[in-house]
Amino acid sequence: MESIEQIIGYHCAPAIRGIKVANLVALPQHLGAKMVEKTHEYNDKFNQKGLFFYELCHCDKRKLLLVFRERMLEDYLRQPEVLAFLQNYGYESYETLADWLLYLRDRIEMSDVFPHEIGVFLGYPLEDVKAFIQFRGAGYKVCGDWKVYGNQASAMHAFHCFRMCRDYCHAQLNKGKSLESLVAVTAC
């Protein structure tokens, strides 16, 4: 059975290594209290390196954990076209990233339909997020870490980099390396 560290280390490797804005991981509910404890521990260890762990929701079967690079995510969300897109879904021009994350959490918990604008919180190209919503997930060019409607070559390159990163982190964790040893420092 994989540990929380191995699950997070594999599924969130691109964010952990600083090559992606954020990753989302679903953790089994039975990890409950252990996950809360680990989330606090990881935030204590990694926030100064620009890496944050945020529980977006929990249901009977799983908890969704957003692992993100604070500065990268904030910069992406503050791009005028991304900000305008989010405002269409009720996100105001909040002062802090924490406000946006809290609103996203509320949307997940209170919506009958999963809020697919979450794609921008994961750093997906805005064009792809908009098209996914418009076409309800159909008609995409290629599917990898997300469904691609726009620049296929750029997305394929990103998918390759993310896969290599996940494989590297998985191998290192299996060799006994700690998650802490894999966290890249990014400029704050």
Image (cartoon, rainbow, N blue to C red):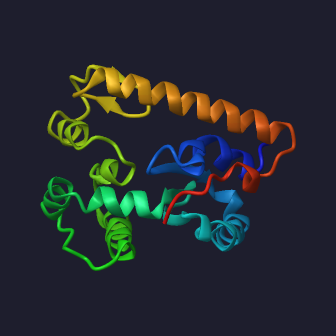
Query: In the rendered image, which quarter is residue 105 located in?
Result: bottom left
Pick the residue in front: 149 or 157. Answer: 157
Q: In this view of the protein, can residue 85 be seen by the observer?
A: yes
Residue at 54% in and 42% down: 14
- Quadrant assignment for the N terminus: top right
Q: Quadrant of residue 48?
A: bottom right
* Residue 172 image position (x, y, % from top left): 78, 38
Residue 85 point in image, percent of width and height: 16, 55
Q: Please state if 150 lies on the left or on the right of 75 as rendered.
A: left
How many numbered discs sit on the rendered protein? 0
Counting from the top left corner in percent of width and height, residue 135 is at: 17, 33
Q: Is residue 114 visible?
A: no
Residue depicted at 70% across the width and 48% down the height: 182
- Please report the residue visible at 39 percent of the width from the left and 58 percent of the height from the top: 73
In the orientation shown, which residue stands out farthest toward the bottom?
A: 95
User: Above or below — where is 50 with respect to 115?
Assistant: below
Report the side of 104 relative to 56 (left or right).
left
- Locate residue 5 relative to residue 75 in the image: left or right: right
View extreme (right): residue: 176
Question: Which image quarter: residue 102?
Answer: bottom left
- Of residue 80 and residue 2, the one placed in the foreground of this image is 80
Q: Is residue 127 above or below residue 179?
A: above
Where is residue 74? Give x, y as percent.
Answer: 35, 63
